[in-house]
Image (cartoon, helix red, strand yellow):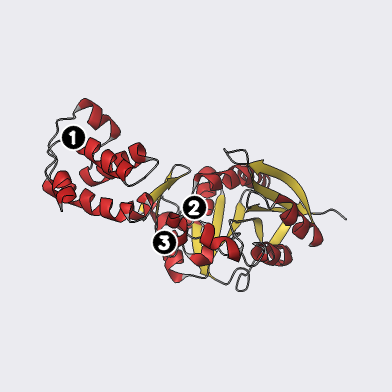
Amino acid sequence: MAESKEIALEATLGTLLKAVRRRLAECGIEAADLEARLLVEHFTGTRRSDAISDPDRPVTRQAAGGIEAALVRRCAGEPVYRILGFREFYGLTLKLSRETLEPRPDTETLVELALPEARRIAAARGRCRILDLGTGTGAIALALLSMVPEAEAVGVDISEEALATAQANADINGQGARFAALRSNWLTDVDGMFDLIVSNPPYIPTADLETLSREVREHDPRAALDGGADGLDFYRSIAAGAHRHLNSEGAVAVETGYNQKSAVEAIFAENGYRTVRTARDLGGRDRAMLFMPARS
């Protein structure tokens, strides 16, 4: 209870920020500075510049109480963006829900890899139809829509909650008219043809799930992580079925685990695709691959 009083009695923006940073550091949070700023700004309705220009600004008890409750959750292992209920991705603000994977910066690598293809197709055809398999928050599809005005997308997920979240994110970001949510077990109930198929499928081998960080293991949905015994189940499914929904000169782009490049390339090659480009994330790890049907 003493810790609760410590936060609740902080009266200014500057002292509150220091107290939150200290509490997070004591809990072993590596990014204590960043997370303290995120929590304080969210619950006080302030901006980063306010703590610098107006550190003596009074903080309401309601805001301090909200931060205290958030600190309890964070120190218990809940990720900060789950607590906030949203995360920034590719310049978009995306709501999170229990059944959506938290979009991370590594996935922006996939967006960057697919974006030139979306633009190429839109320029050639006047439109680009995108299919996002396992859409979750809608992050990949919505990022592409934000950059290609001629594009439209269908986001596929098995979870109704995830689909509702993705549609809400499309609406929030002004893309509701160009985004449609479809419940399907991957390609099972998909109809029609698309110019670009994108996916960040589950790719963690089942046996490795327990080795993931607490934040991921306990708070990201298992269905969005578990890629089967070798982590490759959903690449096989996508590669085997994509041709039935891919227009000529279309492309398939997927995110991969850092050590799966060769295996994923082989799966797509077995299904009649050639590797066009690959991309590494900011840490220099193999992260995304783009395929097109092999020419006969």
Disc 3 element: helix
Q: Badge 1 local density, few (<14 within 10 Å), some, or many (20+)? A: some
Of callouts 1 and 3, the N-terminal one: 1
Q: Position of residue 286 (x, y in %)?
A: 65, 45
Residue that badge 3 annotates: 165
Q: Position of residue 172 (x, y in %)?
A: 38, 53
Q: Position of residue 151 (x, y in %)?
A: 56, 51
Disc 2 element: helix
Which amino acid type is marked by label 1? Thr
Quadrant, the N terminus: bottom left
| Foreground pick, 19 / 111 | 19
The disc label shown at residue 204, or none:
none
Classify residue 122 as left or right of residue 162: right
Of callouts 2 and 3, the N-terminal one: 2
Q: Badge 2 local density, few (<14 within 10 Å), some, or many (20+)? A: many
Q: Badge 3 local density, few (<14 within 10 Å), some, or many (20+)? A: many
Of callouts 1 and 2, the N-terminal one: 1
| Quarter-of-image position of residue 51 | top left
Q: Position of residue 281 (x, y in %)?
A: 59, 41
| Quarter-of-image position of residue 85 | bottom left
Query: Is the residue 1 above or below the residue 184 in the image?
Result: above
Quadrant, the C terminus: bottom right
Which amino acid type is marked by label 2? Ala
Residue that badge 1 annotates: 15
Evaluate if marks 2 and 3 touch, with contact meaning CB atoms under 8 Å apart.
no
